[in-house]
Image: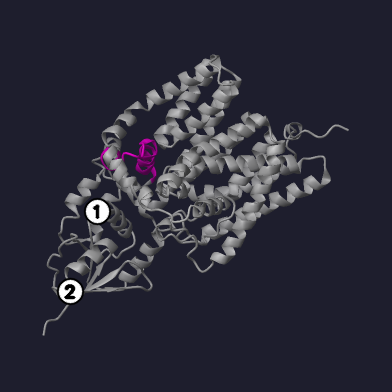
Amino acid sequence: MNPEKPSTIVKQIPPIWLKILVIFLIGLGIFFRFAHLGQKAIWYDEAFTSLAISGHTVSEVRQEVFNERIIPVAALDKYQHLNPDRGIDDTVRYLITSDPQHPPLYYAMVRLWAQVFGDSPARLRSLSAAIGLLIFQSVYWLCLELFESPIVGWVAIALMAVSPLEIFFAQEARQYGLWMVTILVCSAALLRSIRRETFLNWAIYALTLAVGLYTHLFTALVAMAHGIYVASQQRFRFNKTLANYILGTTVGLFLFLPWIFVLITHISTAQQLTSHFSFYKLDNPFNLIAIFMTHITRIFFDINFSAYKPWRNELFWETSHTYYSVMAGIFSLVLIILVYFSSKERLNRASLFLILLGAVPSLCLLLPDLIAGGIRSTNVRYQMPLYLSIQIALAYVLGVYIFSEKHWKQKVGQCLMVGFLLAGLVSDVSFFKADTWWLQEGSQPLVTTAKYINKFENTLLLSSNDFYNIGNMLTLSHLLNSKINLLTVQRDHLPLLPQEASNIFLNDSTIGKNLIGRFKEDKTYSFRLIDEPVTELWKVEKIQKK
């Protein structure tokens, strides 16, 4: 009796029950993508999305608002909403001068979207939710190109429909949901071009590569993985296929050339804004492995526990860490077992492609962290190629097991499928109920700070005008009472505070420590750190001289 071949199994026609299940899960996925879009507080990165579409720049915010004059917090609304006198060209100007590491495609799209549907956080996020629906068609196409298998495509759609990773980025007003779609489409376009070498197919690949680059700079790492795959498939011999790939990639890069020029001319700004990824270091390199495994687990199971904070050098900091650690270990063990068996049964061509697509971008981030230090590889947003590869590989393994001729394999595959789907649904319900999420770095402290400050009357909030605190103030402008006033302070001196302000707070840890040291001998003001229920908030009071 000949052993069953996985490649034959997955090429079967998908049964009706699988299609019905997937359609039901797609319905749930659509619901979780669009439900409660405005419930979660806008967070730091999203505040800069709103600033970008307003057409104003960070320099303008500093000059007009953070200029050591007392202003109402409501004055920041101008920089969080559309300005009818400014257009897409001003949005691009903001990116060039203030945020050059972010290419303009998504921001131009969200600007146009806001002009039609509105610029509230919920309306801005609805674009990401709509884009998130394209991931179903995209992953199905890639699975057809990789495995020639409708079954794997349907299983992959089922996993991504309820994946907490895809759900989160479908509800964030940033470009990462679009980037996931472009990674899948660009990869499928490459495989189709290799399979059917026509001018049109290679032109489509070049175009999708350019679209990916205009969405996120790390698409260049995806292109690197593509190049290694093509070269290895051609046995590193220069032939027509390799020549077509080089030409297609060159055209894609040529189309991206304008933004390459922008990045080169504003490289110092980009380096300054991303330097914190190399500034923070982990004492133990094994922590990187632990973080990797935990983040991979979150693709399938995430209930907002154990938010990792690299700058604290703590892997788990919430009270629920024990429970989540056990779950992370179980899921990671299951994934390792699945990868082992899939490496024995999976098609070589597809195996190589998925390994390269996931490993090349990931290693380009991990190796600098291990060698020079940093936390680049711990950023979930940068690891999209790896997570998509894992999901597709898992879909193939589940497809092989569920539709195997061996009864025990069917049962194993069915149990695993049910387990992963239930884990995703539990995660989605948790996300549905939450007001903030761990991936919204720093959002919970700001929400708590705003609730605390809003309880006081006649309040003045102090902050600095550096880039980080501008983002915090823009975020707080959505959360604070409009009657609260704002005053910018410098690191080395404190301006004269108004007598009429009965409650003065300082929301900047670096500035706070500098001011405390500066005025310790002067004894003009006292600074009291408020530990509970907020963090990094000081109460400032003038010392009454006897």
Residue in front for this viewpoint, 494 or 105: 494
Q: According to the image, label 2 marks what residue? A: 525
Q: Residue placed at 17% from the left, 74% from the top?
A: 525
Residue 87 appears in view: no
Q: Amino acid at mark 1?
A: Asp
Q: Amino acid at mark 2?
A: Tyr
> 546 above or below 23?
below
Q: Residue placed at 70% from the left, 52% from the top?
A: 418
Residue in front for this viewpoint, 217 or 114: 217
Q: Residue placed at 55% from the left, 24% from the top?
A: 230
User: Left or right: where does residue 506 sit relative to residue 312?
Assistant: left
Quadrant containing the C terminus is: bottom left
> 292 above or below 5?
below
Residue 196 appears in view: yes
Q: Which residues are magenta?
A: 95-117
Q: According to the image, label 1 marks what residue? A: 466
Residue 287, position as x, y percentages in the image: 50, 55
Q: Residue furthest top?
A: 240
Pick whichever of labels 1 and 2 is earlier in the sequence.
Answer: 1
Residue 171, position as x, y percentages in the image: 47, 50
> 75 above or below 484?
above
Crowding near the residue tagged with mark 2, few <14, some 14–19, many ≥20 C-alpha atoms within 10 Å? some
Q: Residue placed at 38% from the left, 25% from the top?
A: 255
Quadrant containing the N terminus is: top right
Residue 85's disc number = none
